Structures are given as C-alpha cells and as structure tokens.
Image (tube, rainbow, N blue to C red):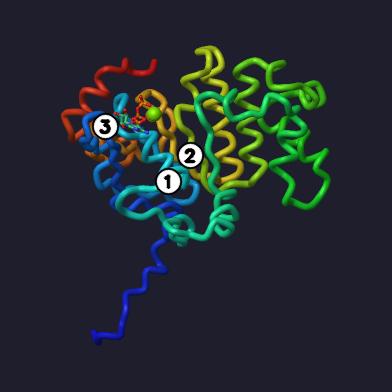
Amino acid sequence: MTMHSSFSSSDAPQPLLVLDRISKHFRVAGGGLFHAVKSVSLTVHAGEIVALVGESGSGKSTLGRIALGLMQPDGGSVTFGGQCLTNMPPAQFRALRTSMQPIFQDPTASLNPRRTVRELLEQALWKQPGDHAQRCLGLLEDVGLRPAARFIDRYPHELSGGQRQRVSIARSLAMEPQLIIADEPLSGADVSIRGQVLNLLLDIQRSRDVAYLMITHDISIARAFADRVAVMMQGDLVEVGPAETVLTTPQHEYTRRLVSAVPALG
Ligand SMILES: Nc1ncnc2c1ncn2[C@@H]1O[C@H](COP(=O)(O)OP(=O)(O)OP(=O)(O)O)[C@@H](O)[C@H]1O
Ligand SMILES: [Mg+2]
C-alpha cells in the first residue's frame, strides 16, 4: 500500500448521525465543573431505532440537545448526513436541521397556543410545493387524528394531551425528516395513550423509513421499540449493542440493574 492509497468506506453504509467523543460540562455553584457528558460516541443509521436509556441525570437529554444542534458540545463533533454540524454557517444549519426533527416530552411547550392546527402545520410546510391544505389533512390522518377536518381548525388548548402530541408529531413529519430525536415523548402521556403513540411512532418508522434516537428512562419502551440500545450512566456510555443482546444478557452491572427493575412484558 502506498501513502496515497486510501481505504474505500463506500461499501459500508455511512451512519446518518455520528456523535464522536462528545463531552459537555456545566458550571456549578462554587465554581466547579460538572461533567454531564463524558466523551460519548454513538451512531444512528438510516431507518434505525436506537434507544438511549439510563437513569435520571445520566446525560441523555444533554446528548440529545447536542445532536440536534440546540447546544454546543465542549468537545467532540456531530456529523449528520456526512456533514459536520460544528461551526456550520447558520443558513446551512437551518437547511440541514429540517431533516432532523425533535419530539419533546411536553407538546404544549412546542406548540404556539395562538396558532390553529392548520397554521402550525402550514408553518412547517412553507418550503414545500403543492397543495398545503390537502397535505395538512393527510398529515393529521397519518397521525390518527380522524376525521382530520374535525381537528384542523382547533387551537392546541382545544385538544387533549395525546392529541397535542400527535399534532407535534404531524408537524415534525411535515418536514419529511430522516431522523427524529424524541426525548421522553411518552412520559407526559397518559398510560392509556402511551401504547397508541408508541404504535404510531413505529408505523411512521416502517412506512417512511425514518430513523429514531429515542431517549427514555423506560426500558420497556426500548424493549418494544429499539434495534439497538445505548446505556448511559453518569455521563458515560457504558453499553451499546443490539436491543435483544443488551436487554437479555446485559454486560454491565448498571444495565442489569436497569433491566431487572422492569417487569418483563406479558
Ligand atoms: N443547563 C444546565 N446547567 C447545569 N447543569 C445541567 C444543565 N443541564 C443539565 N444539567 C445537569 O446535567 C446532568 C444531566 O442532565 P440531563 O438532562 O442530560 O439528564 P437526563 O439523563 O436527560 O435525565 P432525565 O432522565 O431526568 O431527563 C444532570 O445532573 C443535570 O442536572
Ligand atoms: Mg432528560
């Protein structure tokens, strides 16, 4: 091999999202530093569902916000679709960002209360050609708000929590993302609608081939949902692998504790 020859990596599919040695610290009272994320590397491939689990305070949301470009890491890099997000010019970042959509725990906070469902969806569609009125109705149907005409002119406060979550999902879908980063999308929801929203997210993944980074402290969601599971503990990624392997034969004591705290699904 000469100095100039290089390995072709084109035969292996490039991950959609690459988090490379991400670290993040916060200043705490007294002047010290708290290391919330410590050199974490994680990938998500196209169409893949990766569950990021770990107990409260382990750094999951911080990592998710960094992946979305909502927060800058202190070290490491985020690459999406082959493009490095760090120090990307804002206009280029905004264009790329439509391909990577967040879904948050509390849909109320992310929906402008003064806009109707139609306006909220049209805002998300503004860059796309075609008949937006029809698209809006179609999106509502897709997320199970049927008949769509009954919901389209409502304000967020005229919807139930589950219906609001569906509207926020519809709005994310309007951008036709390749990746959805969902931070505890179900924990704000009533137990009775959790299963429905979970099934909805799965349907979307199958029909649109969207990838998910699903942040949750709920192992049973990871079990029902994920292709791969990544386990965070106090800012470190302690285990990552196929969901089946990680959840049935966890290697790390911490993962064993997380898994054994959850009753097996019937
Ligand atoms: N802006 C901030 N300033 C200071 N500390 C922060 C900040 N954001 C997060 N932290 C701390 O970083 C740690 C990780 O927080 P993070 O929200 O990422 O945890 P998490 O794994 O998402 O937890 P949960 O399951 O409760 O949502 C926590 O100890 C938190 O208190
Ligand atoms: Mg969190």
Q: In the displayed structure, does residue 120 sit left or right of residue 57?
A: right
Number of numbered discs visible in the structure rendering:
3
Q: In the displayed structure, does residue 216 sit left or right of residue 195?
A: left
Amino acid carrying mark 2 in the image: Ile
Q: Which residue is mark 2?
A: 181
Q: Is residue 245 visible in this depiction of the protein?
A: no
Q: Which residue is mark 1?
A: 67
* Position above or below: 71 against 84: above
Which element carries disc 2, helix, strand or loop? strand
Dot 1 crowding, Cα within 10 Å, few <14, some 14–19, many 20+: many
Q: Is residue 127 visible in this depiction of the protein?
A: yes
Q: Nearer the viewer, residue 98 or 244?
A: 98
User: Which mark is nearer the camera, 3 or 1?
Assistant: 3
| Residue 132 at x, y percent in the picture | 80, 42
Q: Quadrant of residue 54?
A: top left
Q: Which residue is mark 3?
A: 28
Cβ of mark 3 under 8 A from ligand 1: yes
Proximity of marks 2 and 3: CB atoms separated by less than 8 Å: no
Q: Earlier in the sequence, mark 3 or mark 1?
A: 3
* Position above or below: 223 against 266: below
Residue drawn at (26%, 24%) of the image: 258
Residue drawn at (75%, 23%) of the image: 146
* Position above or below: 259 against 41: above
| Residue 14 at x, y percent in the picture | 42, 60
How far apart, in angstroms, are the residues tagged by discs 3 and 1? 23 Å
Q: Earlier in the sequence, mark 2 or mark 1?
A: 1
Q: Nearer the viewer, residue 111 or 178?
A: 111
Query: On the rendered image, what quadrant is the N terminus found in?
Result: bottom left
Q: Earlier in the sequence, mark 2 or mark 3?
A: 3
Proximity of marks 2 and 1: CB atoms separated by less than 8 Å: yes
